[in-house]
Image (cartoon, rainbow, N blue to C red):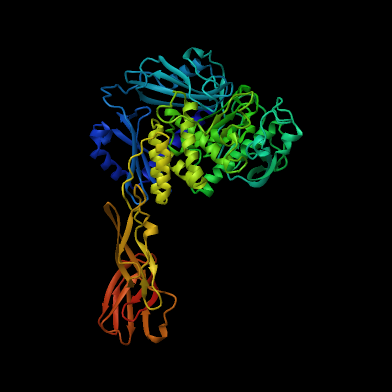
């Protein structure tokens, strides 16, 4: 029954994703672009593409299409089309398979049989925390085949295990751990062959919790804001600043800070490290409990296992609140619906090994040498993989170590913002300042000397340092907030095959689409180019602001301002000159006026929009003009009666300032048909008399 619950949860997530994909008005426009570029994309028809995911955010809207064969998805294939907030297609990325040939897409073994084969191959036992089985056309092993892809995580064995099974005969084609680890390439030790599987043992599934209203309260915790060495501004090995097998020292405990936890769960007086974003779980051995207690104050010293639990909870919750509530970028766990969009974390896993990983909406932290849950860099880095996964709807890329570099950047962006090191300190650039750069392992840096692509060494953790380093160089110039936004929004435009080169273009495009100043775009271009990326020339453009609604002064006039700051012309050298008509300082009256902006930098581009000048509704003296407007509210006909209204013009505006009707008043008593107006509040404006009155349309 528990297994059935997991299956239902997986179905519900798929249904939700389908609804998300359908809640877009851009699909037809995206498909038109795909058809017009079919030859370059090397696809026969857009009918072989299924819209599986769409996302709206600060930089616009991104649609993701998956390649299909007879209704079966082609594994790791995707075509991404991104629209700016103005509805313009500004970025695309694709990874489609050409010349698939004829493939039989009818499986000869059942899904249940495939799961049983997978369980036996990897030796599933104990509690299963995640299991997913899907049918794909698979091209990673040469000849395209119809396969079942089963991914399983369970407490008895660290990692997330992918088994590829031939759907025609049940043959196991591939077995590997697809979890994403924080360690160096020589440090993680998680390359596996299919021979590692054991015999199948009894298993049971983590229960799917029933969704219910949760009672949250404010709590507190003792944590390291980043790590104890950075806070104390000392090196590892300084007196009192060694791991010592997780032993307390006065020096280490002194670096703890009492922080507020905006939410902790309270169930009948039992407090748990759970919020709207994050929840503690036991996902892998060792099982050290959930550290529930009768108080919302989680104050531990570092030799207590509860310290790592509270520290991980604080940092992950803090990071997600920063993204969603401070930056205003929607980003929550969305790959396993049984979590209800909440990230699960285990502060004591990996069977005690010195490593940590992200997989399937979960984070697991190891305990070897320095406990990984004590170092904020490790926590933010691993969460960075999750952000990459969620922003792309499950299409995280490790090409050129893109996701490793992204995790390093996300961690460094946070720790550097704390201003603990000077730019002249070597540790200013350290990644994993407490967990690494010591006798445990060497750590990494965001001051990596190699450039792209010649500096690539085909190791994801090493190569990712190129990406993290250039992002931090941009960060140092334009600041944390702008760089973080462009980074996250840019990642959301990538797919599972995106390399660092194309990711750089996507990040810069996100900044352009969010209307960053031209000087910021120039900084990005220069820093990316210096790091070895080939950056296309920035085309001259104006970020057209769209229609502007304003209010006239007491005399019914409006002085036209400069819209240059709104349009923010982007050119290669930021030398574009912007002119506009009507000119700055021109006087216009109530009504709709066409504004044309022209940016010139060698060539010229235009931007045209409407300037809607509404009447000043709060200052008119109606006593001077004796008239009646009735009935109010009106359902079909509005009558206007008064003296001196011959040859008067009236205009009706909705609450957005848009003119919806205009009529001439021939006599002192006239009727206007308002039956076709939508229900709401409207303004009736007398053009010559320059007075107005509100009425309600029922």
Q: Position of residue 652 (x, y in %)?
A: 33, 71
At a point 39% along the width and 76% down the height, the residue shown is 693
Foreground: 186 or 270?
A: 186
Give residue 354's quadrant in the image: top right
Side of 677 relative to 10 (left or right): left
Give residue 664's quadrant in the image: bottom left
Q: Position of residue 631 (x, y in %)?
A: 37, 77
Side of 128 relative to 454 (left or right): right
At a point 27% along the width and 54% down the height, the residue shown is 604
Q: Which residue, as the protein is rendered here, is positioned at the far front?
A: 424
Q: Which residue, as the protein is rendered here, is positioned at the far right?
A: 250
Q: Position of residue 282 (x, y in %)?
A: 61, 29
Foreground: 27 or 438?
A: 438
Give residue 613's quadrant in the image: bottom left
Side of 519 relative to 36 (left or right): right
At a point 66% along the width and 42% down the height, the residue shown is 267
Q: Position of residue 89 (x, y in %)?
A: 32, 45
Q: Is residue 249 above or below residue 56?
A: above
Q: Is residue 89 above or below residue 339?
A: below
Q: Is residue 477 above or below residue 461?
A: below
Asked if residue 493 shows in the view, the reply is no
Asked if residue 447 shows in the view, the reply is yes
Foreground: 600 or 675?
A: 600
At a point 38% along the width and 48% down the height, the residue shown is 513
Q: Quadrant of the C terminus?
A: bottom left
How many tags in the picture? Answer: 0
């Amino acid at each position: 029954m528990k297994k059935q619950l997991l299956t239902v949860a997986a179905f519900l997530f798929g249904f939700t994703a389908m609804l998300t994909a359908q809640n877009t008005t851009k699909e037809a426009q995206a498909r038109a672009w795909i058809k017009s570029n079919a030859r370059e994309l090397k696809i026969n028809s857009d009918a072989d593409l299924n819209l599986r995911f769409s996302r709206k955010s600060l930089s616009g809207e991104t649609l993701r299409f998956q390649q299909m064969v007879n209704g079966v998805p082609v594994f790791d294939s995707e075509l991404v089309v991104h629209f700016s907030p103005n509805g313009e297609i500004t970025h695309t990325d694709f990874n489609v398979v050409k010349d698939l040939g004829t493939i039989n897409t009818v499986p000869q073994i059942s899904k249940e049989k495939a799961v049983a084969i997978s369980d036996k191959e990897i030796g599933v036992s104990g509690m299963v925390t995640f299991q997913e089985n899907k049918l794909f056309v698979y091209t990673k092993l040469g000849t395209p085949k119809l396969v079942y892809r089963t991914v399983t995580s369970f407490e008895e064995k660290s990692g997330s295990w992918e088994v590829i099974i031939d759907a025609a005969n049940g043959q196991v084609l591939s077995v590997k751990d697809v979890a994403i680890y924080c360690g160096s390439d020589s440090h993680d030790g998680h390359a596996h062959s299919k021979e590692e599987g054991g015999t199948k043992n009894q298993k049971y599934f983590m229960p799917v919790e029933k969704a219910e209203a949760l009672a949250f309260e404010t709590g507190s915790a003792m944590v390291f804001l980043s790590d104890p060495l950075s806070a104390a501004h000392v090196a590892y090995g300084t007196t009192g600043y060694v791991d010592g097998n997780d032993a307390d020292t006065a020096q280490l405990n002194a670096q703890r800070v009492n922080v507020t936890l905006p939410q902790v769960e309270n169930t009948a007086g039992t407090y748990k490290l759970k919020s709207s974003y994050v929840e503690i779980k036991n996902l892998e051995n060792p099982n050290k409990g959930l550290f529930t207690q009768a108080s919302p104050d989680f104050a531990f010293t570092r030799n207590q296992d509860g310290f790592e639990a509270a520290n991980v909870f604080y940092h992950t919750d803090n990071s997600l609140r920063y993204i969603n509530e401070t930056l205003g970028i929607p980003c929550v766990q969305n790959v396993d619906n049984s979590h209800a969009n909440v990230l699960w974390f285990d502060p004591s896993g990996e069977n005690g090994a010195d490593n940590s990983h992200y997989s399937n909406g979960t984070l697991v932290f190891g305990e070897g040498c320095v406990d990984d849950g004590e170092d904020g860099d490790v926590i933010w880095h691993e969460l960075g993989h999750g952000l990459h996964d969620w922003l792309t709807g499950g299409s995280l890329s490790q090409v050129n170590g893109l996701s490793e570099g992204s995790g390093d950047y996300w961690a460094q962006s946070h720790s550097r913002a704390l201003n603990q090191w000077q730019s002249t300190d070597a540790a200013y650039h350290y990644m994993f300042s407490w967990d690494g750069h010591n006798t445990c392992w060497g750590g990494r840096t965001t001051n990596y000397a190699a450039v792209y692509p010649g500096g690539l060494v085909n190791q994801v953790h090493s190569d990712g340092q190129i990406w993290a380093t250039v992002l931090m160089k941009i960060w140092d110039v334009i600041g944390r907030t702008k760089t973080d936004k462009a980074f996250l929004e840019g990642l959301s435009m990538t797919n599972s095959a995106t390399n660092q080169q194309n990711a750089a273009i996507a990040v810069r495009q996100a900044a352009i689409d969010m209307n960053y100043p031209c000087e910021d775009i120039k900084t990005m271009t220069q820093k990316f180019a210096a790091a070895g990326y080939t950056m296309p020339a920035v085309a001259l453009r104006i970020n057209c602001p769209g229609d502007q609604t304003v209010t006239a002064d007491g005399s019914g006039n409006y002085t036209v301002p400069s819209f240059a700051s709104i349009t923010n012309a982007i050119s290669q050298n930021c030398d574009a000159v912007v002119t506009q008509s009507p000119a700055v300082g021109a006087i216009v009256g109530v009504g709709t006026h066409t504004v044309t902006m022209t940016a010139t930098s060698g060539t010229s581009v235009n931007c045209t929009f409407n300037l809607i000048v509404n009447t000043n509704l709060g200052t008119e003296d109606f006593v001077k003009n004796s008239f009646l407007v009735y009935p109010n509210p009106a359902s079909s006909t509005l009558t206007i009666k008064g003296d001196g209204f011959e040859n008067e013009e009236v205009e009706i505006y909705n609450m957005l300032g848009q003119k919806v009707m205009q009529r001439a008043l021939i006599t002192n008593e006239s009727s206007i048909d308002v039956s076709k107006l939508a229900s709401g509040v409207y303004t009736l404006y007398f053009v010559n008399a320059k007075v107005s009155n509100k009425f309600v349309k029922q």
